[in-house]
């Protein structure tokens, strides 16, 4: 069996650019990020301001939740706002290849906390979060809320570099209708150690591209994430992304590819299980519901007209989530 930190045998490893958020040379960061966005849409972010000690605490608390009995986890089953627990096989990301089952992972969604009596609470992805009882996991909620807030700060810093790489003002994505009032969804993930077999359609997470603007991924030191730089190649070539201690792996989502008129890439990726438990935390960052996603002025010309019609962010995301998650009615037997 592969040992932790050991490179998987007979596989390609993708070497990604590394963006140091503490680097005072902004132009160097812009150049490295632009190269990554044109090439594969994935890069590392280091010196992001979240301490290693706190990252380890978040992973420890995540592990404590997933170690609870299934009956306890089902008490906080995800709701229609995509808050709470998602059981194994709940999500089906690659229906063409995952013929019989969904993803062999379980997860937990935490979003922006919006009180139930807030006028915004009726919108998809907004509303109160679902939390385990404090008596079962003391301090769990406070840890997750703190991480959610700190990760949003990292995402905004990355978005400023992306804006400069697209020849926009640095604060372009800071506007209220964009990341001023974002849809920011954090997802704790646990892969229990099932061995993936692509020939049988068995994956930790099926091949997919992310829906939104950018995703930050914190992971333990177990290999699993793979990317495919050219989804149209036959056969497809998959490369592992090496875990990097203390760093976020950042990737661009479909919404940014759409916004940039396909100049920047949203890349196909998947997770293969190798028999080891694996934990990760994905942080999905999208603009506000009302944000109109239309081709950026710096990404179109007479020779390169917009490839997509404008669409509201909330409408787009709701459809993408609906397409990939199980209908909640299938869990009614657990609620009785």
Image (tube, grey):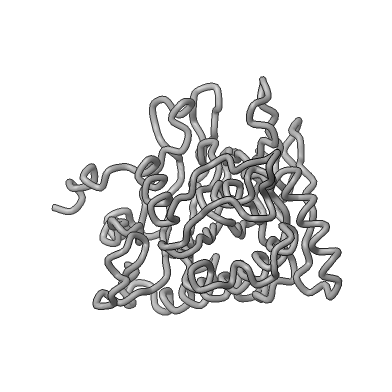
Compared across the picture, whether 26 is left or right of 309 comes to right
Which picture quadrant has residue 44? bottom right
Considering depth in this image, is 269 or 260 the residue closer to the camera?
Answer: 260
- Numbered circles on residues, count: 0
Q: Give percent across and percent down for residue 17.
A: 79, 53
Vertical order, 280 against 160 (above or below): above
Compared across the picture, whether 182 is left or right of 24 comes to left
Point 51% across, 40% down: residue: 204
Vertical order, 16 against 206 (above or below): below
Point 60% across, 59% down: residue: 216
Q: Is residue 57 visible?
A: no
Q: Is residue 153 visible?
A: yes
Considering depth in this image, is 51 or 60 the residue closer to the camera?
Answer: 51
Point 42% across, 25% down: residue: 99
Q: Give percent across and percent down for residue 178.
A: 52, 67
Q: Give percent across and percent down for residue 197.
A: 55, 28
> Which residue lies most toward the left here?
336
Compared across the picture, whether 274 is left or right of 187 comes to right
């Amino acid at each position: 069996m592969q040992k932790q930190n050991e490179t998987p045998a007979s596989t390609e490893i993708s070497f990604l650019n590394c963006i140091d958020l503490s680097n005072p040379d902004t132009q160097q960061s812009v150049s490295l990020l632009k190269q990554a966005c044109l090439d594969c849409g994935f890069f590392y972010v280091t010196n992001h301001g979240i301490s290693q000690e706190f990252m380890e605490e978040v992973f420890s608390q995540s592990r404590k939740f997933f170690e609870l009995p299934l009956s306890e986890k089902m008490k906080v089953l995800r709701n229609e706002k995509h808050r709470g627990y998602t059981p194994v096989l709940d999500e089906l990301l690659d229906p063409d290849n995952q013929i019989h089952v969904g993803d062999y992972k379980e997860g937990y969604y935490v979003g922006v906390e919006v009180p139930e009596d807030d006028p915004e609470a009726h919108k998809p992805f907004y509303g109160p979060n679902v939390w385990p009882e404090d008596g079962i996991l003391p301090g769990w909620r406070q840890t997750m809320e703190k991480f959610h807030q700190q990760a949003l700060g990292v995402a905004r810093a990355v978005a400023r570099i992306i804006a400069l790489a697209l020849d926009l003002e640095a604060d372009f994505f800071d506007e209220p209708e964009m990341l001023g009032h974002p849809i920011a969804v954090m997802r704790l993930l646990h892969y229990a150690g099932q061995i993936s077999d692509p020939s049988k359609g068995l994956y930790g997470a099926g091949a997919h591209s992310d829906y939104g603007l950018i995703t930050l991924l914190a992971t333990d030191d177990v290999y699993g994430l793979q990317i495919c730089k050219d989804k149209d190649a036959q056969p497809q070539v998959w490369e592992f992304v090496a875990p990097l201690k203390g760093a976020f792996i950042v990737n661009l989502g479909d919404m940014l590819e759409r916004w940039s008129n396909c100049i920047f890439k949203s890349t196909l990726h998947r997770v293969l299980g190798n028999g080891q438990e694996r934990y990760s935390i994905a942080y999905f960052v999208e603009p506000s519901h009302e944000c109109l996603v239309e081709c950026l002025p710096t990404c179109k010309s007479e020779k390169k007209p917009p490839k997509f019609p404008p669409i509201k962010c909330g409408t787009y995301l709701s459809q993408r989530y609906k397409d990939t998650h199980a209908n909640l009615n299938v869990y009614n037997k657990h609620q009785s």
